[in-house]
Image (spheres, rainbow, N blue to C red):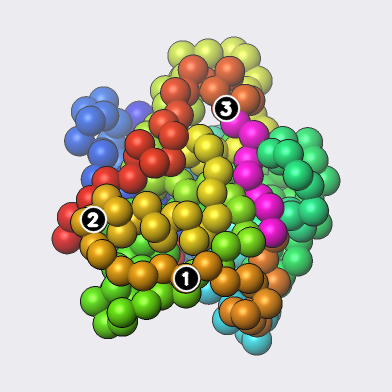
Amino acid sequence: MVVLVTGAGGQLGQAIKHIAGEYPKVTFIFCSSSELDITDKKQCKFVFEKYQPDYCINTAAYTAVDKAESEPEKAIGINVMGVQNIAEVCQEHKTVLLHISTDFVFDGKKETPYTETDIPNPTSIYGRTKLDGEVVVQKFCEKHFIIRTSWVYSQFGNNFMKTMLRLASERDVISVVSDQVGTPTNAVDLAEALLQIITVNQQLSTLNLYGIYNFSNEGQCSWYDFAREIFKINRIAIAVNPIPTSSYPTPAKRPYFSVLDKHKIKDTFGITIKEWEVSLEPFQS
Ligand SMILES: NC(=O)c1ccc[n+]([C@@H]2O[C@H](COP(=O)([O-])OP(=O)(O)OC[C@H]3O[C@@H](n4cnc5c(N)ncnc54)[C@H](OP(=O)(O)O)[C@@H]3O)[C@@H](O)[C@H]2O)c1
């Protein structure tokens, strides 16, 4: 079985690479943005014709949430038009597409975890482009899984955990937003869940399991709680100051609450999900 991974130089792409050795029956093709630019339809066709993938995990995305507010065309170009290219080549090659989406498709006005059937209402350009990306996947590729995730961190790429560790080496006190609640997701846990989806889908190929699924670690916390836990586990003594969102204005408006309900993915694919604190390990450089 051939699994092609787009955006392989990014955080999730590297996490998938990290666990690839655990799946000896799978031939992984990792394409970074320089090897496969998803906005280039000809290149998409060329790569799919060359490798004939059974599955494509599309981790490629424009992920600069705040910057998207000032360059929406670029975000749309990658998160919508680029995703359409991938969806279309997947359809042509009968490739199953696993596309990654986000909790930022929701407005955060709910007080209980978001299910896959809750109505999205993004509050940012990034969230809007990711939602539009979901729509093109649904429209252009029959065999698709859309996996919505949240607050992804790892030892790879740029993420909140690494920002906190860097700031701790530069400052004596750190202020962190305490009124936005969600769930951190260890990128390696997400990578394993994606491979479990592929494994189960292969075994139960006669069932139509396609559709939208939520995945994050279990539990919930604020960014402030998350920062404190990061420092605790890395044995860093630093003062952390809780602040409201209003004291940390950003160009993009983020949801106040974006915890995802994981019943569907657990029940369908037999995935066991760790609590976010359990999955958080000391940083390894
Ligand atoms: N990080 C989070 O907290 C979070 C939360 C919810 C959902 N997600 C979603 O999870 C997925 C993976 O995120 P991530 O954290 O791994 O993001 P990331 O580290 O920013 O990686 C994204 C990758 O996409 C690549 N890329 C950008 N434009 C491309 C193009 N035109 N063609 C091919 N590749 C391109 C980037 O390559 P270059 O660096 O070379 O441009 C980068 O390697 C994304 O769909 C994201 O929206 C992330």
Q: Is residue 96 visible?
A: yes
| x and y, in percent, of residue 272 in the image | 44, 23
Going from the N terminus, do you reach mark 1 or mark 2 first?
2
Tell me if mark 3 has few (under 14), some (14-19) or many (20+) residues whose alpha carbon lies within 10 angstroms of its own. many
Q: Amino acid at mark 1?
A: Asn
**Number of the label disc, if any, that sits on residue 241:** 1
The secondary structure type at the circle numbered 3 is helix
The residue type indicated by label 3 comes to Ile
Closer to us: mark 3 or mark 2? 2
Q: Classify 10 Å Cα crowding around label 2: few (below 14), some (14-19), many (20 and above).
A: some
Q: On the image, which quarter does residue 240 sit in?
A: bottom left
Residue 260 in the magenta stretch? The answer is yes
- For the C terminus, the quadrant is bottom left
Say which of marks 1 and 3 sits in front: 1
Residue at 35%, 39% in the rendered image:
279
Q: Are marks 1 and 3 in contact (CB under 8 Å)?
A: no
Q: Earlier in the sequence, mark 3 or mark 2?
A: 2
Q: Secondary structure at mark 1?
A: strand
| Ligand 1 contact, mark 2 (Cβ < 8 Å) | no
Q: CA distance from mark 1 to mark 2?
A: 18 Å
Residue 6 in picture, x, y percent from top left = 42, 55
Q: Which residue is mark 2?
A: 234
Q: Is residue 209 above or below residue 93?
A: above
Q: Which residues are magenta?
A: 256-262
Going by the numbered disc 2, the residue's amino acid type is Asn
x, y (%) of residue 250? Answer: 62, 80
Q: Position of residue 29 (x, y in %)?
A: 31, 47
